[in-house]
Amino acid sequence: MSKSQYRLRRILAISAIISVAAALKLISDVATIEGFSLRIYDIPLMLGGIILGPYYGFLSGFVVDFIYFLLSPYAIAFPTLFTAGSMLWGGVAGVVFYRRKPRLRTLAPVVVVTSLLVFALNSAALYGDFPTALGLHPLPMIIPRIVRTPLLWPLQIAAVLYLNERVGPELARVVEKR
């Protein structure tokens, strides 16, 4: 396979991952109940980082956030700390697991630590000047996010392990050099 064919396959694979993640991020805004949304766009980003590496993981997070900024009426600004948070999902998984199979005992701490870092970045972005400018107190706004974050960990871990087992080998085969 030529170098250009190899690059094209990687670009097509990451494009598919980006499109799924962007759709999940946009759909999660619609399914919001009093500030409690189920955000699972991070699962395809982690899978992309694991299979394609940290460069594509960070890049996919950046592109997903850019698409979200362009298409969502809820997007505040671009680039922000939200962008850094999206980039962390794919990038950290890529740094830790690229060319290695994630296991439950190794994936769980990565998901928890990444989730807490993204939570901190998003909280800083959300509650920095935004609520004060609207005359709101940030504490009641953060409670649904505090509850949601640990509830998502089992879903994120199980989904990444399952998808990596089912989709990962096929996706890796498509993008490997031959």
Image (cartoon, helix red, strand yellow):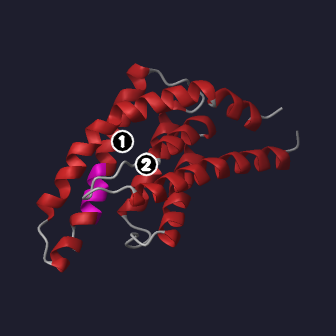
**Is 30 or 15 nearer to us in this picture?**
30
* Image coords of residue 170 (percent x, y): 71, 30
Q: Residue at x 78, y 50 (%)?
A: 8
Q: How many marks?
A: 2
* Image coords of residue 20 (percent x, y): 58, 49
Tell me the SS state at disc 2: helix
Q: Residue at x 13, y 77 (%)?
A: 135
What amino acid is found at the position of numbered circle 2 in the picture?
Leu
Give the crowd class for mark 1: few <14, some 14-19, many >=20 residues within 10 Å.
some
Q: Which residue is mark 2?
A: 88
- Based on the displayed image, in which of its 4 quarters is residue 131 positioned? bottom left
Q: Which residues are magenta?
A: 119-125
- Based on the displayed image, in which of its 4 quarters is residue 35 positioned? bottom left
Quarter of the picture holding the N terminus:
top right
> Looking at the image, is mark 2 or mark 1 earlier in the sequence?
2
Give the crowd class for mark 2: few <14, some 14-19, many >=20 residues within 10 Å.
many
Q: Residue at x 52, y 70 (%)?
A: 71
Disc on res. 114: 1
Please report contact status of discs 2 and 1: CB closer than 8 Å, yes or no. Answer: yes
What's the CA distance linking mark 2 and mark 1?
7 Å
**Vertical relation: 21 (above or below) 135:** above
* Image coords of residue 62 (percent x, y): 51, 59
Residue 122: in magenta span: yes
Left or right placement of residue 44 versus residue 177 in this view = left
**Vertical relation: 137 (above or below) 42:** below
